Image (cartoon, grey):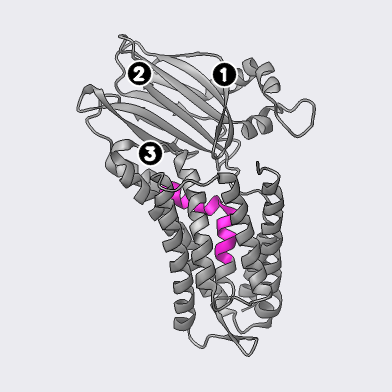
Amino acid sequence: MRAKAIYVFLLFGLITGSPVLAHQVSQSQLALQLDSAEDAGQAVGNWHIGLMDLELSLGLDRDGNGKVTWAEVRDREAEIFAWAEPSLRFTQQSVECQVTPSSAQIDRLNSGLYWVLPFRLSCPEPLENISLEYNLLFDQDRSHRALVTYEFSQQGNAQARDKITRVLTPESRTLVLDWTAEEGNWLGIVQDFVVQGVWHIWIGLDHIFFLLALLIPGVFRRVDFRWQSYDSFKGACRDVLIVVSMFTIAHSITLTAATLKWIVLPITWVEMVIAFSVALAGLNIIFPVLHRQRWLVAFVFGLIHGFGFASVLSDLQLPKEAFLTSLISFNLGVELGQLAIVLLVLPLIYSLRNQNLYRRHAMPVAAFGIFLMGSFWMAERAMALP
């Protein structure tokens, strides 16, 4: 029991001491397409690298005012390219292809501001089975992800093209690009988007904190304004199952609706409301006026969290021919990541539900930590509102 108590304090220490940033993910993007020119050995591309990553790696903010301006980026363009270029390598039959850069630009995606480098890829032969090796930031940041999107010709028809999206990680840095594939690798698409769904729920601290705020009091009932432990694991599971199911249904609805462009909300306001939901859920543990209605809280705010997931998915450039497959796979990944958290947390807190350590110390401290984090995110995101 003492070991479990130590584990609980470590768990809730992690909650209250976690980084205050959420959704500022280290991510780069590489998009390639066949050149419209007659030369079959050429393609054009755009390389997106986050300004936050450039600032951390190169220190672009020379005046130290906390903001990276376009002038500061432009003045360092040659240095940025010299730093990034060795991390990107294309080869064809062991012969290296040439990357010719154009003038860089700035682009805003849902995940933040990016430095964009347009370039031309030239290979000795027609673009078949090009090997890509990508090493940008992987050795400095193990959480970095690179999204690679490239066109392929359907059934060899150059006029009928679709896109394939793949995810490169520190453990998987190479990719073979085949512009003449008859069809996309369906299994590869499913695998990549499931992994992305799991990954984004695990790195989305605001989503995790909201889920934890729903789980932490889930081993108790409110009887005469007091906490009363569930007598059986089945009772606690039923409570948690209802709450988590409502959250799942809600964010699945809006994830789908937003991805299909049926409903579009400003992402800055979405992130603001998500932060509010975290603060409210934490406060509801300290003052449990909505304990029995946690399922309703989960559903209402789950609708908003779904828009947050959709903003991440929109940056992944879903392949047209496998749009629904990619959407379903990403959502499945989110649910699997969420399930892993539930399976990790629920048995532990159930085993400690009758301990004063949990009821009088760990739970209130965690709740207050979640409330503070949500409040901080609200203040931070309010400054970004238009």
- Residue at 33% x, 42% y is 323
The mark found on residue 318 in the picture is 3
Q: Is 177 drawn above or below residue 330 in the view shown?
A: above
Tell me if residue 6 can be seen.
no
Upstream in the sequence, badge 1 or badge 3? 1
Give, as a three-letter code, the residue at label 3.
Leu
Using a 10 Å C-alpha cutoff, classify the residue at mark 1 as few (fewer than 14 neighbours), some (14 to 19) or many (20 or more). Answer: some
Image vertical order of residue 371 relative to residue 161, above or below: below
Residue 384 falls inside the magenta stretch: no
Q: Quadrant of the C terminus?
A: top right
Q: Amino acid at mark 1?
A: Ala
* Residue 308 place in picture, x, y as percent: 52, 50
Instruction: Choose between 324 and 228: the one closer to the eye.
Output: 324
Q: Quadrant of the N terminus?
A: bottom right
Q: Position of residue 179 (x, y in %)?
A: 30, 24
Question: Which SS type dominates the magenta stretch?
Answer: helix
Front disc: 1 or 2: 1
The residue at the point 50 percent across, 19 percent down is 118
One can see residue 209 in this view:
yes
Q: Which residue carries the number 1 mark?
A: 104
- Range of the magenta residues? 195-212
- Compared across the picture, whether 31 is left or right of 293 comes to left
In this picture, residue 92 sits left or right of residue 74: left
Residue at disc 1, secondary structure? loop
Tag 2 residue: 92
As drawn, which residue projects farthest toward the bottom?
A: 224
Q: Helix or strand or loop: what does disc 3 sit on?
A: loop
**At which x and y percent is residue 18?**
67, 55
The reply to whether discs 1 and 2 touch (Cβ–Cβ < 8 Å) is no
Look at 47% across and 68% down and name the residue there.
244
SS category of the residue bearing label 2: strand
